[in-house]
Amino acid sequence: MSAAADAVDAASPHSRPPHPGRWRSALAITLLGVALVLLSPLVGSVPIPPTEVFRIILHQLSGGAVYAQPCAGVTDSAPLCSAYVEIVWDERLPVLLLALLAGAALGISGATLQGVFRNPLADPYLLGLSSGGALGAAFVYVFRIGEAEASLVLPVLAFAGSLGAGVAILLAARGRSGSVETLLLTGVALASFLSATLTIVLLYNPTGSLQVSFWLLGGVGGATWNRDGVAFGGILIASTLLVLHGRELNVMQLGNDVAQSIGVPTARLRQRLILLASLVTAMAVAFTGVVGFVGLVAPHIVRRTVSSDYRVVLPLSAMTGGLFLLAANDLAVTVLPGTQLPVGIFTSFAGAPFFLTLLYRRRQASTMGDS
Amino acid sequence: MRAPSASGRAVAGLEGVTVRFGSRTVLHEVDLSVGAGEFVALAGPNGSGKTTLLRVLLGFIRPSAGRATLFGTPVDELPITERARRVAWVPQEEANRDNPTVREYVGYGRYPYRGRFQAESAVDRERVEESLSDLGLGDRGDDGVQTLSGGERQRAVLGRALAQDTPLILLDEPTSHLDIGHQLDILERVRTLSRRRGTTVIAALHDLNLAARFADRVVILSRGRKYDDGDPARVLSEGLLARVWGVTADLRRDPRTGVPYLLPHQRVVEGPAILAGPGFGPVHVVGGGGAGAPVLRALSDDGYRVTTGALHLLDTDAETAEVLGIPMVVEVPFAPLGAEVRSAHRRLLEQARVIVVAPFAVGPSNIANLDDLEPFVPQTPTYLLAPTPIDQRDFAGGAGARAWEALRSAGAREVDGLPALQAELRSLEARWRSAVPAAAPALPS
Amino acid sequence: MSLNPPSTGPARSISFAWFAVAVLVAAGAAVAATAAYFEIRQNHPSASATTMSLTDDVGRTVNVPVNPSRVAVLSPSIMDSMYRLGLRSHVVAVDCYSAAFGGLSADYSSDQVSLWNLSSSMCVQVGPTLNVEQLLAVSPQLVLASTIISVADVEEISTTYGIPVLILQPTTLSGIVLDVDLLGSLFHASASASLLSADLALGLGNATRVAQNLTNAGTPFPTVMVTYSPVAAGSPSPGYYSFGPGTFGTSLIELASATSISANSTLPYPELSGSAVLAARPQFIVYGTGFGLGLPDYAQGPDWSSFAAVQSGRAIGLNSNFLTEPDPTMILDGLPALLALFHPGVPV
C-alpha cells in the first residue's frame, strides 16, 4: 500500500499550488497593502513634508539613535516640531492602525456571515448590530455621563449594545428551527425595533442627536494607542478563532443537510460563528461607530480575485477590509484640504457603486439561467 | 426472502418508524432491516415517503414513533462525526455557488477524519485520488466544479460521498435530472463500487425499471407505508403498477439479462381531437430528459394547443406533459424508440402547425426523433431551441450533430431561448391571421 | 508504510489553520511591541509652570494654565464672551461655525467681525467632528469647548496630548454670568469681567423687577410662541418648533414676563401642529431670523394666516442667536428685545 500511496501522492497535483493566478492576486493585494501602509502616514489635514514624516518615524523608532533631532527643516521652531511629532506619532499612526484593525474586523465578519447565511449580500450589521451599538452610544451622549468616564463608557456601551443585539437574536432563534431565514428575519425585526427606540430616546433628549448622527457615520479619528491595544486584543482573538473555521464554512456552502451528512454540526457552528462575527463587529463598532460597506465589499474582492475557499477568504477579507478602510480614511482627510470628513462617507461612496455592480452582475447571471 | 432480522447485525434498521409533520403522516410504522453489502432500492410514486425514510436514517428527522438504528446504535445517539464515518449521502441536487476544484470538493468528504489542526493525511489524499479515478474524474481534478456537466457533477457528488469512506451510502434520486445515458452510468458505477468495497447502498429511485435493474432488493413505499419488500423478480408485477402508480402495464423480461421490466400501455391521442379545439396550433414539442418541460409549460401557459413526443415514460418531460394534459407519444424507459412509437410520433408531427425542438441531450435512445422530423421541416415552420450548442449535448457519437445540421439545412431556424421562441410564435401567428384567417397556409418564406 | 510520502516534506504536515494562527500571532506580537514602545516614547508637553484648578460646567475638575496665550475656542457662545472680554489675541483656533458660517456675524456688525479676523484656516471643528491634526498644529495650551465635542476627543486631547479641555455650557441664565467670571479669573481679565458681569446682572435684575411689578399690579402675562428652524414646505409633518420645559428659550420667555404655550410640553423641543397653535391662541408669535431665514419661511407653515397673533400684527422676527445661544448677547440684547415686545411702554 505504501508504494501505491507514494505513487499516487507523487503524481498528485497537491504538490503544487493549483492556481498560480490566484496567488498572484493575493500577492498583489499584499504589495498594495504594504505601499498603502507606508504612504498613509504622509497624508493628513496638516501638510508635513514626507522627509520630516520619515525622519520623525525613524527618530522615534530608534529612540534618537538614527536622528538626534526629530525635525530637520523646522529645528528653529521648537513648538512646531513637537506638534509635528505629536501629529505623526500620536495621531496618524494610531489612526492608521485603528483603520486596519476595524476594517479587518468588518472584513472577516462580513466573510463569515456571507458564508453562514450562504448569501453574498450579508454584511456585519445584518443582525441589528449597528442599531444596538448606536443605542449604546446614544445613552452616553444623551444622559451626559461625566466626560471623564464617558471616554471609557462610550466604547463599552457601544460594544455591549452591539454584541447584545447579536446575542439576543441567537437566543431568540434558539430552540426554534434555528434556520437561517428565522435568524435573518429576527435580526431585521430587532434592528427595526432598536432604531425606533433610538429615535424615541433622541426625540426626548435632542442634545445628543448631533453626536449620535455623526457617530453613525463612523470614523477612526478617535484613535489612541490605548484604544488600539484593546481593539487589537479583542479583534485578534476572535479573528483567529474565525480563521480556524474555514473548512467548516466551505462544507456549509453545500447546504445544511449535506454539511450535516459530512459531519459538520451546522446548527451549533452557525451559533458559534455568528457569535464570533458579532464579537469582532462589536469591537469595531465600539471604537469607530458604524462604518458601512467594508464588510460587504472586502469578501467579494477576495472571492473575485483570489479564491472562494473560505480558508483563504477569511484571512484575506480581514486584510482587504483593513486596507479598504485605510484607503477610505486617506481619502477622507485629503479630498477637501483642511477638512476631515467622516470615513463612513467614503466607504459608502466607493462601496455603493460596487454593491450595485454586484447586484447587476447577479441579475445578469440569473436571467441567463432562466432561459 | 426477508433480510436479516432487526438485530444489532443490521447496517441500517427501522422499527415501527412513524413520521408526522403536523397532522400529516408521512411514514407509517415502517420496518426495514438492511444487511451488509445489500443494494436496496426504495421505489414509489412521488410523495410516498422515500426521501423522508432516508432523512430519518441520516438523523435529519427524528421519528415521531419507532426507532432508527445504524449498526445497531440508535441514530440520534451517534455523535455527528461518528455518524458521518458510517453513512454518506448523495442528494438529488446540490446547490453550491462556490467553485472549488473537483479535487477540493471531493476532499470535503474527508472532513470527519481530520482534526481542526490536522493537515490532510496521506490516507486522505489517497481516498480522494481513488474516488476521482473510480468515477472517471482523474483528469478533471483541477477544474472548478462549476465547469462540470450535469453528469460529471453528479459523479463528483458521488465521489465526495465515496471519499467519506463509509460502509453505508444513501442516495436520494441521484439521477433524476440526468439523461438516460448518465443515469445508467451513475448507477452502474454505484453498483460496481459497492460490490468491490462491500458498501451497503440504499437508493431512492422513482424509476421502477432502474430499481429492478440495479438493486438486489426493492422496497416499495406507497402513501408512507411499506407496500412490498423483496427480490425485484417477485416484487415487480403488473398489479404493482396498477395499485401503487395507477398505471396499466405489461410485465416483460429483458431477453439478455432476464431482468424484469414493466411496459406501461402507450397513451397516444389521435389527431382529430386536437384539431377540433379553438386557437392556434397544435405546436408540437420534441423533447426529452427534462429539456422540454419548460417549453411545454410556457407554450401551454401562452394558450397554444401543444403536443409532444416521442418521450420515455417516467421521464420529467413525460410527467410534465401528463400533469398539463398534453397529448404525447411515449416509449418504455431507456429503450430505443420502437417502430410503433415512431409512426405514432410521425402522425403527431404531420398534424403540427409548428414544430419546436427542445435542447434535449441526444443519445442512441432518442436520436430517431431528429431523423423522423426532418421530412416535415420543409412544409412546417420548425424552431430549434439551442441555448447550448448541439455538440455539447450529443451523446450519439456525432450522429446527433449531423442530424441537427440536416434539420438546419432543411430550413429549421435556431433560436437561443424561450423568450425568443415565444416572440417568433407571436409574429408567426399574427402573419397567418392577417394573411388568411381560417386556412392553414404555408410559412411565407 | 510511511504516512508522509517523501515528495512532501515535514512542512506539509502543518495545516493551513496552524499557519494562519502563527501568522496572526506573530503580527499581534509585532504590533503589541510597537504599541508598547510608542507608549513609552510619548512625550507630553510639560505642564505650564503656573496652573489653577477649575471645575467646568459638566462637573469636571481640570488643571489649566493661568492666562494661557494660545487657546482653541470651539463654540460661538464662548467666542461671544471672549470678544466682550477683549481676549481675541489669545485665540489660535476656533470652530468652523464661528469662523466661516456666520455664527458671529449674526450677533455683530460686519466691521466688528472683520476686526476679529477669524480666518477659515483657524477652524478645526465641524459639528462634533474635531480635526485633531489641525488642532495640534497650532499647539494650543487650552481648549474651551461646548458639550457638542465628542467624549472620545476630550479624552484623546487631554490624555494623549496633555492639553486640558474646559467645557463651558451654562444650563441657566445665571450660569452665563458665572462662566464670564470664570473666564475673567482664568485670563487675568477681572476688570473687564467685573464690568460685563455687572451689565449682565443688571439686565437680569431689571427683568425680574419688571415681572414683580407686573404681578403686583395684577397685569396678566401674555401667552407667546417662540418658534425657530421653520419646517420645510412639503415635509411629512409640518409644524412649528417651539421651546418646552427646561430650555433656555422657556427661561428667557418667563424672564421677559410671558408664558410659552409649550412650557408644559412633554418634549424639550416640541413640534407644534397648526391646530395646536390655533387652540393655544398665543398673543405673540416670535420667529427666529438670520441665516437667510425670514417671515416667508414661517408663513408657509400650517394655518399661519389664521393665527390671531398674525392677524393682529403681533408676529415679529428676532435674531435667532438672541434666542438660542446661551451667551452674554442673549441677556444683553435678547431679553430687552422680548420685554419691549411683550410689554411696550413698561420702563426697564
Image (spheres, coloured by chain):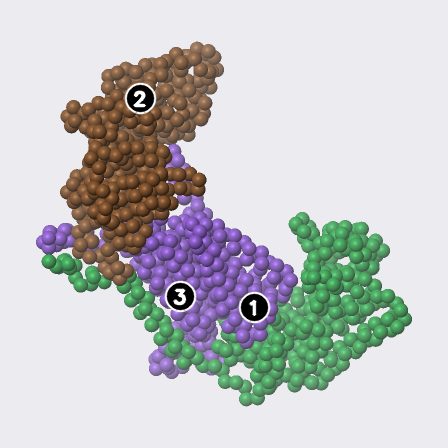
In the structure shown, which secondary structural element does the residue marked by tag 2 occupy?
loop
Chain under label 2? B
Q: Depth check: C100 or B225 in front?
A: B225
Which residue is found at the position 35% from the left and 60% from the top? A242
Q: Do discs 3 and 2 share a chain?
A: no
Gap in Å between the C-alphas at discs 1 and 3?
23 Å
Establish if C307 lies above or below B355: below
Which residue is found at the position 27% from the left and 23% from the top? B238
List x then y, in percent, for residue A276. 40, 61
Q: Do discs 1 and 2 share a chain?
A: no
Kind of residue indicated by mark 2: Thr
Colour given to chain C in the rendered image: green
Q: Which residue is mark 3?
A: A235
Kind of residue indicated by mark 3: Ile
Q: Which residue is mark 1?
A: A140
Which residue is found at the position 40% from the left and 23% from the top? B325
Q: Do discs 1 and 3 share a chain?
A: yes
Q: Which residue is mark 2?
A: B248
**Which chain did the renderer colour brown?**
B
List x then y, in percent, for residue B36. 19, 44
**Which chain did the renderer colour purple?**
A
Which residue is found at the position 48% from the left and 62% from the top? A164
